[in-house]
Image (cartoon, rainbow, N blue to C red):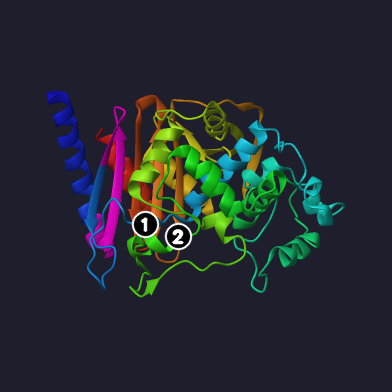
Amino acid sequence: MLLALALAAGITHAVDATVKPLMAKNGIPGMAVGVVAGGKPFLFYYGVASKATGQPVSQRTLFEVGSISKTFNATLASYAQVRGFISLSDRAGKYLPSLRGAPFGDVTLLNLGTHTAGILPLQVPNGIDNDAQLLDYLKGWRSPKAPGTVRLYNNISIGILGLIVAKSIGEDYAALMDRRLFAALGLENTFIDVPPAKMSDYAQGYRKNDTPVRMTQGELWAEAYGVRTTAPDLLRWVRANMGEIDLDPTFERAIAATHTGYFQAGVMTQDLIWEQYPYPVALPALLEGTDMVEGAVPARAIEPPLPSQSNVWINKTGSTNGFAAYVAFVPAKNMGIVLLANKTYPLHERVKAAFDILSQL
């Protein structure tokens, strides 16, 4: 009991000492923080979900998590492979007949899930509003770099992977997430489409200039950045990735497989969307890897792929115009962290805050 109280007190001090100055520096209206240590979850809430209403951030507050959504997409793809619907070694053209014979049709599903498809724009180009227009665009796509030779972060490749998985299973992508993945994980307050009854819990996001904003639902939004969730649910997601939640064995296998190391890109090992570093890791290495969200980096395939490891730091950042998020966990140390904010702020500051808190554990 005394050890548990000391642990809770130490975590509270570490989170308060880091988060309160971070919010003040960046003018963040509200944050939710989740920490898992010693197999126990700890949750902290700061500020308001909306400056207009003054509603405080709580365990019910829904935040946009941006590209952390991609980790759910990757897990759905891994689940589809475990169930035999797809193989990551398959080519995109197998599932998208209009791309057969085109360079994009020869890209593997593994390339789509590891940002190694080639040189693609970060976002879906303006003027593309539906799947047919996107496939037409990809039919004419050419990359100066061959698949598997560079790692270039983008929304298109993982979005297409989501489309392929949904098509292979024969269900709508959002419905698959809600009915299969979120339900199986016990994520009761995690959504692609926020139900009307939950809209009052949806935090208001704020741009850097403090104007209110929420995500724009463009082409591939659901697959690439569409998840809204709470701190308790996102911390449960982290615990599921550390093997601390009892799940159906199919989903346990699917989650573990997303931690396979497929490519070495700079200081970082690229898993299926997740980004991985040997532990212990130095903060400069994490910051260098975080900077790889911009620009192509040479990639080397790891042969054979690196099986799921425990003594690693695994992380993912997520951003929309008005929200900022970060998750990281170290399975060998049974520790992880979730940072959710309803205002955008720099990636480096998120990573440093998480590193500072976890280092004190």
Tag 2 residue: 194
For label 1, the SS is loop
The residue nearer to you, when weighing 92 against 349, is: 92
Tell whether label 1 touches label 2 (CB within 8 Å).
Answer: yes
Q: Which part of the image, by quadrant, shows the C terminus? A: top left
> Image point 57% across, 29% down: which residue?
250
Residue 243: numbered disc: none
Identity, as a three-letter code, of the amino acid under mark 1: Leu
> Is residue 294 among what the camera can see?
no
Q: x, y percentage for residue 303?
A: 67, 27
The magenta stretch is 22-42
Q: x, y percentage for residue 298?
A: 64, 44
The image shows residue 194, relative to residue 353, as above or below, that is: below
The image shows residue 206, relative to residue 327, as above or below, that is: below
Location of residue 20 by image quarter: bottom left
> Image point 38% across, 45% down: which residue?
233
The image shows residue 256, relative to residue 186, as above or below, that is: above
Q: Label 2, label 1: how many angstroms apart (C-alpha)?
A: 9 Å
Q: For label 2, count other residues whose C-alpha is less than 10 Å away and answer few (under 14), some (14-19) or many (20+).
A: some
Identity, as a three-letter code, of the amino acid under mark 2: Val
Residue, far right: 101
Q: Is residue 118 left or right of residue 222?
A: right
For label 2, the SS is loop
Residue, far left: 2
Q: Say whether residue 24 is magenta.
A: yes
Residue 62: numbered disc: 1
